Amino acid sequence: MKSSGNIRQYIDQKRAEYKHLVNHIDRQFLITLHQRNIVSIDQMHEEVRALSGKDPLPAALDHNQAEGEKLSADEHEWLVRRTYDYVCKHLSSEEVERIINLTIKRDVVRELDDFAKLASVSTRLLAEKVRQFTLLSDGENRLPASEVMGTRVALIRHFISDQLEFIGIAKNFVTIREIDEIAERMIGLEFGQGRIGGKAGGMVLASCILKTFEDLHPDWPVATPESWFLRSDVIDRFLELNHLTGYQSLKYRTTDEIRHEYPLVKGVFRNSDFPVDIVQQLRGMLKEIGTHPLIVRSSSLLEDRIGSAFSGKYASVFVANQGPTEVRLQALLVAISEVYASTMAPDPIAYRRERNLLDYHEDMGVLIQKVVGKKVGKYFLPAFAGVAFSRNEYRWSPRIKREDGLLRLVMGLGTRAVDRVGHEHPRMVALGAPTLKPTASDQTTAQTSQRTVDVINLELNRMQSIDIDELLSLDDAVPRLDQIVSVYQDGILSLPTGTRISAPPSSLCVTFDKLLERTTFADAMRRILVRLEEAYGFPVDVEFAHDGEKLYLLQCRALASHVDVAAVEVPRDVPEDQKVFGANKYVRTGLLPDIEYVVYVDPATYDGIKTPERRIEVARVVGRLNHALTGKRFILVGPGRWGSNDIRLGVKVGYSDINNTRMLVEVARTKAGYTPEVSFGTHFFQDLVEADIQYLPLYPDEPDSCFSESFFGQPENALASLLPKDADFAEIVRVIHVPTVAGGSMLTIAMNGETDEALAYLQ
């Protein structure tokens, strides 16, 4: 400890060095003496009056009389001397240094706060002020969170999001130092103002919330991928530079016009130029990254907001990032242009129109991330990836609790977890009972397990879907393979006995059984979701990937969830001739009365379509009906998987094709080979939840099923009257006007999630 003389010398040195802070330093020491009960401020003032030869102040007679007098210059000088006499006598040198450092830090924060509250300050200048703050020694000299909360709020509004709900959460977790880390990786115009957008902001916030998670589950350390942020102001300059601002009015056209124009928009954007300084910054980024594969993701200012997630609406593009720098740069610029063009796509525009967000000036930030994964032969992929939900809306067993959450797990890139693709299913995991499968037998599990893996082909320089047998036949081992696959032999699935697998690839099935039975992964994911939901105050969903060593959080957002409704009784006394269809699997409680129209895509005739073009046109007809029936109460009933990427397995509709319907029904006919995969967890399903569209799979060919062939085979078809130009699709798409075919009755659909029963009947 320094002597009192050395302490006073140190104080004088700092007061001389920070002349503009002298009064603040003096005041802080006086406050400290008062708070420590060493000497009160009133006592100090009395001592000063005595030293200057004045009598003590008389007590105030009433509350309307002033309690003291302003100090004279001489008295102020005496106050400073007496303050430091007490300081040197009662405070240690460490305490003195801490108080002075905190005073200096408060001054820097005050200046930063002033800049952050300026409406027109450039992002670059504000980032410099943030850096000045972070260069100050931290250690024990931390300012209370309450003192910097206003500054945090202003910085979050400048750098991340202006959404009040997001700011209200983020201010408690995102520190000024974390803002500095964001600013260091921002790419933008030198004097521009822009944010990183919703998707990037959600990832940053979740990372900050989970900072201490490793202490709770050391087996599953959580990280975020290396990321760079192309600011939201760059798209405006891109549009101006290429004279493309006129396309911003495209959003006011009809859905059909937008769909017709969109391919042209993508081509124009792809062949447009970027500002020179942006290209230089991206080139520098690529030199720093090297040839590690990248993903270019949308991060719109509207995206991942509470109440409007925009799940899967905008583009995300994988960039293999192989070859010379200039080749890689051009591929990156094309990917960014595709993300920009996706702001003009039909689905996000329909989504915005529905939520009265159409007139909002939609600036698009771009999140550029290193793809999580390892090199396996000529391929690059994570060991596994998926999407996790803190609430499980569709429970296939009474043992499953809604609040325990759900995972959709896939091997390789996570695209197959959020899209509806192929005959194969991701592994669905109820986190409260992780070993409980939706499938009834090992044989069914093996038949529906993942057989195709999404990877990045480093030789072909693009993303690719490959057969799992090809991947497993390579010399390089997939990380954690023994935890991903099971051995299927003689109709029985068994866990690999060790980490090395000798069974042939053809006998391996992706089940994740060992991961879920022999590790704490499911418990770790459940804890992550609980912590995030507690912080958000809403249910959440996250996208994640694991490279075999670390668990990476890719995205986090508040999750739209069904509003709980009162129990619905499914009537028992409905005459058989009034029953239209029924279900006893994957039912969610709800009641839909007064359905006037049923749009039915016949599975058999759809299966008989010979050309992919004709199948795609069926989806367009459904989209036009969706528009024509706006304001009417109607449901869509069709084969297999609505919205599937594989047009053989279902009608390839987008959000703008189905957003007006009350219910989406998926029909699995054995003879047509359609199998509805429970879609919960896909981007498509999230659209249904947010739009309050009910979902129900039907299995008409199973015993005890209910499906009225006579109702759906009605000769009356209102398609031609609604869409005369599409009359030639009448054999495939039937529009049933319920009152016309049912003597004035309407259709009612009653669903009870507790008993897993649903019935549609005429009433």
Image (spheres, grey):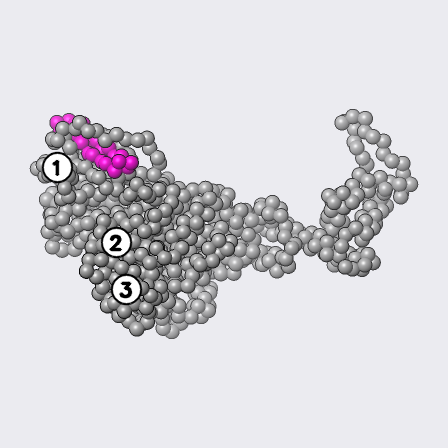
Tell me which label, 1 or 2, sits earlier in the chain. Answer: 2
Residue that appears at 70% across and 54% down: 98
Give the magenta part as a residue range: 742-763
**Kind of element beneath mark 2:** loop
Crowd class of label 2 (few under 14; some 14 to 19; many from 20; radius 10 Å)? many
Label pair 2/3, CB-CB below 8 angstroms? no
**Residue 30 falls left or right of residue 708:** right
For marks 1 and 3, give the CA distance.
42 Å
Q: Amino acid at mark 2?
A: His
Q: Amino acid at mark 3?
A: Gln
Q: Name the residue tied to disc 1.
A: 708
**Kind of element beneath mark 1:** loop
Q: Name the residue tied to disc 2.
A: 425
Q: Name the residue tied to disc 3.
A: 464
Figure quadrant of the N terminus:
bottom right
**451 or 658: which is nearer to us?**
451
